[in-house]
Amino acid sequence: SKMMRIMPGVAVPIVGLAINDQIVTVQPVNSESMEPTLKVGTNDTSRDWILIERGWRGRGWRRNEIVVVRDPRDRKNVLLSRIRHVQGDLARIPLPSGFNKFILVPRGNCWIVSDNLKLPTEDSRTLGPLPLALVEGRVTAIVWPPQRWRFLKEEE
């Protein structure tokens, strides 16, 4: 049986799957923005490692998908967030006054919001609508640690 090492002391069986970083990648969660759905943990063995499907731009992005988005302010960084609204939707922004502000998501854009609303995370609440061209892939599964392996559904 072939084994692939993804971190020291951890081996994962490979079942005839060729991984190309243009198609799928496995990466650790390094931000608390998506907690409790995705866990940061205290080290590589306790944090979630996620499977990211890339190259899905042509099929359209859907509400509630967890996505990796290139940061519009610094293209070297990426944001991990959830698509809450797509083009043509009205995004509601609660204001400190208790009133709401509504923004129409423009064509070719999406509105992303992190699951962890307690943190001042970077998402559309501060960045506004983001061009779909910045969405690099969708998170489809948690692949590490073993007790958290599962596919992610859009409803989560």
Image (cartoon, helix red, strand yellow):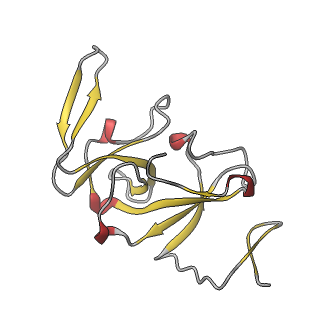
The quarter of the rendered structure image containing the N terminus is bottom right
Please tell me how many numbered marks the rendered image carries: 0
Indicate the position of residue 105 as horizontal and vertical percent values: 20, 45
**In terms of image quadrants, where is residue 15?**
bottom right
Seen at 70% across and 79% down, the residue is: 14
Seen at 62% across and 45% down, the residue is: 39
Q: Residue furthest right?
A: 9
Indicate the position of residue 88 as horizontal and vertical percent values: 17, 48
**In terms of image quadrants, where is residue 112?**
top left
Indicate the position of residue 43 as horizontal and vertical percent values: 73, 49
Vertical comparison of 120 with 153: above or below: above
Vertical comparison of 30 with 93: above or below: below
Which of the two residues, 75 or 13, is positioned nearer the viewer here? 13
Q: Is residue 146 left or right of residue 40?
A: right
Q: Is residue 71 left or right of residue 144?
A: left
**In terms of image quadrants, where is residue 28?**
bottom right
Q: Residue furthest top?
A: 97
Seen at 59% across and 50% down, the residue is: 30
Q: Is residue 4 left or right of residue 64?
A: right
